[in-house]
Image (cartoon, rainbow, N blue to C red):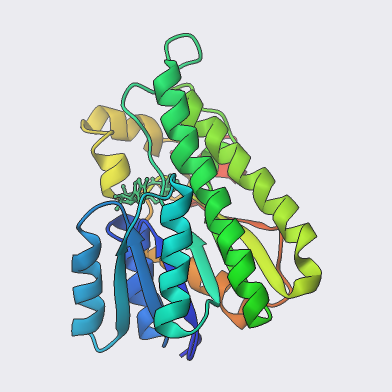
Amino acid sequence: MRLQGKVALITGAGSGIGRATALRFATEGAQIVAVDIAGAVNDTVAEVLAAGGDAIAVHADVSVESDIAAALGRAEEHYGGLDVAFNNAGIMLDDDTDAVATGDETIDRTFDVNVKGVLYGCKYAVEAMRRRGGGSIINTASFVASVGAATPQIAYTASKGAVLSLTRELAVVHARESIRVNALSPGPLRTELLMSFLDTPEKRQRRLVHVPMGRFGEAEEMASAALFLASDDASYMTGANLQVDGGLTAAYVTPE
Ligand code: NAD
């Protein structure tokens, strides 16, 4: 019960990493505010409740500041405060390719959700955590913030680099307020987001050759890492980028 008595807000909780983390945090004793733009967040909450946990669903678009403010408001109103904010919602658009071909609309929407969404999440979490006397913020970045890919998604990659840098700065600014801010950088995962994009065995193999462990990661493996960052086990950790990527960012030549 590493999150006993803690209130945790998770964005993108309707699917993939966010859903797995909501279920995991709840089994560790947290009260969950599950946030998503999609109706699937209701299913996540139903799963938490069925397992004996405590959760509420909030429908919100993280790129809209007033939605985030309202979501944080719900956390404080319903559970009396906020201890953990997992700013995890993110998008990767189909027509996001290289710098020459990627249009303005795609760049703007990607940055609105992946960067502004995380920044708004941090802004309102910091305010709520000040009222609480501290807390842990976790922002989902990606391995592509650290290594380039010849299969480009330039807007997505740039947005994840921004998540890393804003995480570092927030960590330093709020370190003496007992607010820790860390990034979680997943490797390529077997979630809806990536598998719908890598829809042929060839596309998947093109990526897997670069992963030393030779497999995609699982959402549950990210939930374990998020749990560590959320809990007091990570009490001396802030401004870090926790790379959970099967060895990808450490690799030059991978095993056959
Ligand atoms: P996913 O698509 O399974 O889940 C993302 C969730 O975010 C969905 O439920 C979606 O409805 C929600 N969402 C999208 N836009 C939103 C918005 N504007 N407001 C609120 N909710 C919104 O994806 P996932 O694989 O679980 O990805 C979660 C995070 O992990 C993302 O930030 C993604 O960039 C990052 N990531 C994923 C991978 C991967 O391989 N899957 C790798 C590295 C990083």
Q: Residue 20 or 82: which is nearer the viewer?
A: 82
Residue at (38% x, 76% y) in the render: 32
Q: Report the number of discs.
A: 0
Q: Is residue 103 left or right of residue 129?
A: left
In the rendered image, is residue 203 in sight?
yes
Name the spot of residue 128 as percent of width and height, x first: 59, 72
Residue 97 seen in this snapshot: no
32 left or right of 187?
left
The answer to whether residue 207 is left or right of residue 200 is: right
Task: Find residue 117 and report its horizontal and vertical position in percent.
Answer: 49, 47
75 relative to 158, above or below: below
- For the point 21% across and 66% down, the residue is 42
Above or below, 99 against 247 in this view is above
Above/below status of 122 relative to 144: below
Q: Position of residue 45 (x, y in %)?
A: 25, 73
Frontmost residue, 194 versus 182:
182
Q: Is residue 66 above or below residue 205?
A: below
Q: Residue at x 30, y 51 (%)?
A: 37
Quadrant containing the C terminus is top left
Q: Looking at the rendering, which quadrant does residue 184 occupy?
A: bottom right
* Residue 101 point in image, percent of width and height: 42, 10
250 or 244: nearer the eye? 244
Residue placed at 24% from the left, 52% from the top? 38
In the picture, the quarter occupied by the N terminus is bottom left
